[in-house]
Image (cartoon, rainbow, N blue to C red):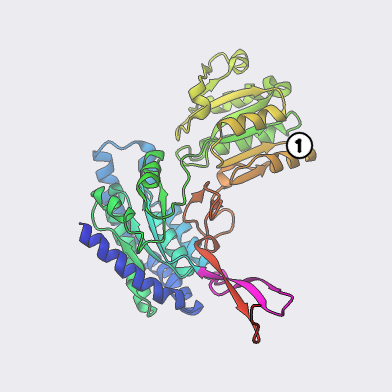
Amino acid sequence: MRDEILQMGKRAREAAHVMAKADSRSKREVLEGVEEMLHRERDSICSANEKDVTLAQERGLSGAKIERLRLSDKVLGEMAGGLKEVASQPDPVGEIVRMWTRPNGLRVGRMRIPLGVVGIVYESRPNVTVDAAALCIKAGNAVVLRGGSEAFHSNHCLAGILRRALERAGLPPEAVQVVGTTDRQAVLEMLKLEEYIDVMIPRGGEELIRFVAEHARMPVLKHYKGVCHVYVDDEADLEMAVRICMNAKVQRPGVCNAMETLLVHQHIAERFLKPMGEAFRSAGVELRGCEQTRAILPYCLPATEADWHAEYLDLILAVRVVKDLEEAIDHITTYGSQHTEAIVTENYGRAHRFLQEVQSSLVLVNASTRFNDGYQLGLGAEIGISTSRLHAFGPMGVEELTTTKFIALGNGQLRN
């Protein structure tokens, strides 16, 4: 296995040299070809995915995990839409992002270049195979993908489509490689390839991400978990707040940008929590609240200290009544994971303060936390959401898969 992974790294490095020089037309041709094949080969994709879903059900995987695994018509449509959007975006490679002139006339600038070889370790979601590869291709990178065992057939089917599209466009198919084993030892071998893989991006549960961060010899772009908050201010439109909170918690509870803690201003707690609590109960959400919350909602379970730290990824929600905006921000600073936070308010000053003081990768005013997603934010797709701050913060699109190098243009300058 060690030699197999090593050879994959070497092939990826060779392919990355070619991809870095690929012209915009060829890269666009690849992405358009993949989009077209997703439609044409829908039956074979769904057949491979159904094998994975059936095996997952036989293994007793949770409903949330099976949901993430399933390539529904909606997910396939989003994949195709993401490919179209990424294909239409400007090519970042070679872009001069800034230029200035020194006193001696030397013109200095920064030029975008690919990262090189990107390694991605991920669980469940086979759409990551296409989204990640598409972004890497657009940014002139090669990518080595190691998906979870539960999506083995889906990932290999989709990778085959990507490789055929690369070959048709005259680019090396080795720019997209999927590790052909479900043995976890393969991940350890990937994490040793600092000579060939420039950056690792883990996508999945906290255990997987910590495993990658602990063992990787190359930089890791990551987020450990999404403890996302919505704060409902006493100057909020309460009907809007109910809609936002329902969407943030219930639409897809098993994802990292779902709300896990609801914070409510004490002055509107009773007026808001009674209808909000009933809406959550109707949707099957288990509530765990502070003493003030339980005084308003007697059916609410008592929250413990662990609940404020929890990423449930399920229909469970922690609820806390707070004194004011400052206490809400303090709670987020103490318990948040720098992923996604939202405020619902009609007060411009408080909204601005929330945007300024809350240091998460996406901070929203009067909108659901579910928008922390590359596709939803106009990136076409995302390779992951980084809470690392270096070298990216938030959803990572095409630009985040490049770096910049310095360039200098002179006419004979010499250093004294």
- Up the image or down, 392 lies above or below 245; here it is below
What residue is rendered at 40% in x and 68% in y? 34
What residue is rendered at 52% in x and 24% in y? 281
Which quadrant is home to the C terminus?
bottom right
Residue 95: say if magenta: yes
Please state if 323 lies on the left or on the right of 387 as rendered: right
Residue 116 appears in view: yes
Please state which of residues 272 and 98 is positioned toward the viewer in this rendering.
98
Hey, which residue is sitting farthest bottom in the picture? 412
What residue is rendered at 56% in x and 38% in y? 248
Please state which of residues 211 and 63 is positioned toward the viewer in this rendering.
211
Please state which of residues 43 and 75 is positioned toward the viewer in this rendering.
75
Residue 163 appears in view: no
Range shown magenta: 88-113
Residue 1 picture location, percent across and down: 20, 57
Residue 349 in which image quadrant: top right
Please state if 154 lies on the left or on the right of 244 as rendered: left
Residue 391 picture location, percent across and down: 53, 55
Q: Mark 1 Cα within 10 Å, few/some/many (few <14, many 20+)?
A: some
- Up the image or down, 274 lies above or below 340; here it is above
- Up the image or down, 384 lies above or below 416; here it is above
Residue 22 picture location, percent across and down: 45, 78
Please state if 292 lies on the left or on the right of 131 as rendered: right
What residue is rendered at 73% in x and 36% in y? 345
Residue 379 picture location, percent across and down: 56, 59
SS class, disc 1: helix
Report the residue marked by disc 1: 350
**Callout 1, which amino acid?**
Arg
